[in-house]
Image (tube, rainbow, N blue to C red):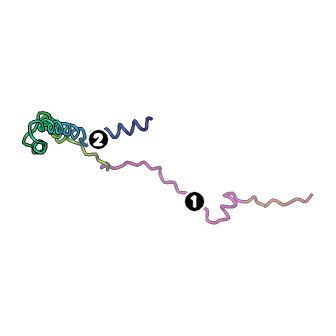
Amino acid sequence: MFARTGRCVVALVLFVSVGGHWFCLQSVAWARMVVNNSQRCSFSQAVAQTFDGGHPCDLCKHITKARDSERKQDKQTPTAKTDLFCAMNRVSLRPPFVSFKYPNSVTVLICGWQQPPSPPPRRQVV
């Protein structure tokens, strides 16, 4: 249920963000204009008067005014550009170099670092 509600909210937000609410309001205004104009003249003349732009209704004027003021606000709002790359030098603290004596042969790795006991241990037979 929450997933469906979330999808509906996201769809509504996207619809409003691309100006869909102005389209819906303008559609309502045009429908009202066609109905009102068709009462005075023929349907084809009513449609022609509705969409010629020379006879806007009060709702069309308000929609145009509000849409234009919204566009002006969008243009006037300065948007700060995000700097994705840092221009500062990085300071890295590295530990001091310590030299290490690596073993010279494989036998040292197998036997270890210690020297064998001198003299070598003898096997005692009991």
Question: Tags 1 and 2 in contact by the CB under 8 Å rule?
Answer: no
x, y (%) of residue 126? 92, 57
Q: Main secondary structure of the magenta part?
A: loop
Q: Is residue 13 left or right of residue 39?
A: right
Q: Is residue 90 left or right of residue 73?
A: right
Residue stretch in magenta: 86-115
x, y (%) of residue 123? 85, 60
Position of residue 109 relative to residue 54, above or below, is below
**Mark sitting on residue 15:** 2
x, y (%) of residue 72? 15, 39
Tell me the residue at 69%/57% (across/down).
Answer: 114
Amino acid under disc 2:
Phe
Pick the quarter of the image with the N terminus: top left
Instruction: Identify residue for label 1.
Output: 101
Task: Name the quadrant containing residue 101.
Answer: bottom right
Residue reaching furthest bottom? 105
Task: Name the quadrant containing residue 112.
Answer: bottom right
Dot 1: element: loop
Count up the numbered dots.
Answer: 2
Label 1 to label 2: alpha-carbon separation: 69 Å
In the image, 25 versus 48, the foreground residue is: 48
- Of callouts 1 and 2, the N-terminal one: 2
Dot 2: element: helix
Tell me the residue at 43%/35% (across/down).
Answer: 2
Whether the magenta-drawn stretch holds residue 107 is answered as yes
Amino acid under disc 1:
Lys
Tell me the residue at 76%/60% (across/down).
Answer: 118
In the image, 72 versus 57, the foreground residue is: 57
